[in-house]
Structures are given as C-alpha cells and as structure tokens.
Image (cartoon, rainbow, N blue to C red):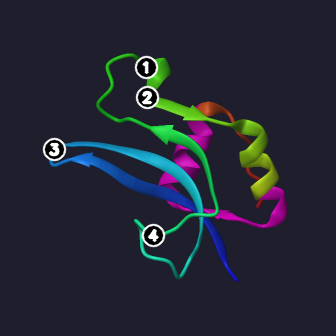
Amino acid sequence: MSVKIRLKRFGTKMRPFYRIVVMDSRVPRDGVCLAEIGLYHPIEKAVEKQIVIDETQAKEWLAKGARPTDTVRGLFNKKGIQIKS
C-alpha cells in the first residue's frame, strides 16, 4: 500500500480550504483518510493561520514511509519541516 500525504479540499466555490491528510494513494481526493495532520487555508489574511501542521505526526508518517505530494512538500518547507529523500 502506497501512502501519501496530500490535500483534501473543503469549503465552497471560490473559498476553498484544505486539510493535510495521510491517505492511501488509490483513494479519491475526498475519500477516507488515515490521519489528519494539519490545515491549509490559502485565503486567510493572518499569515500564521494559513498553514497549521502537527509536526510530530508529520514526522511520524514521514518516518513510516509516507510520501508528500509536491504541494504538501512546499507547505512543509514553509513551516520548516525537514523531509529526508
């Protein structure tokens, strides 16, 4: 089973927000997730509230072999979470 850390879309049209989730790569984008490890709210004005990630859970899943998508990798870089390739 290939596990990915990716975004799950919520919100309305033109006002999206996302949850950063751990999912099986074969599950659809809005399907059942294994764990929710954070939030990404791109239209939030307060910068500190745009990206909220539970670093301990993120590092645990990365240690277990979960692969982040390119977008999530960029969010991790912004928050300073190191990803070992």
The CA span between labels 2 and 4 is 23 Å
Q: Where 15 falls versus 43 (above or below)?
A: below
Q: Which SS class for mark 1? A: helix
Q: Are marks 2 and 1 in contact (CB under 8 Å)?
A: yes
The mark nearer the N terminus, 3 or 2, is 3
Q: Which residue is located at x 41 percent, y 68 percent?
A: 29
Q: What residue would you read off at disc 1?
A: 47
For the residues carrying marks 4 and 1, which lies nearer the camera in this image?
4
For the residues carrying marks 3 and 1, which lies nearer the camera in this image?
3
The disc labelled 3 sits on which kind of residue? Answer: Met
- Residue 5 highlighted magenta (yes or no): no
Residue 60 appears at what percent x and percent y? 81, 51
The answer to whether residue 1 shows anywhere in this view is yes
Q: Residues within 10 Å of mark 3 (few under 14, many from 20)?
A: few
5 and 83: which is toward the camera: 5
The CA span between labels 3 and 1 is 19 Å
Magenta range = 62-78
Q: Where 80 falls versus 74 (above or below)?
A: above
The disc labelled 2 sits on which kind of residue? Answer: Gln
Q: Are marks 4 and 1 in contact (CB under 8 Å)?
A: no
Residue furthest toward the left?
13
Q: Where 24 falls versus 34 (above or below)?
A: below
The mark nearer the N terminus, 3 or 4, is 3
Q: Quadrant of the C terminus?
A: bottom right
Q: What residue would you read off at disc 4?
A: 31
- Residue 74 highlighted magenta (yes or no): yes
Q: Which residue is located at x 47 percent, y 53 percent?
A: 71
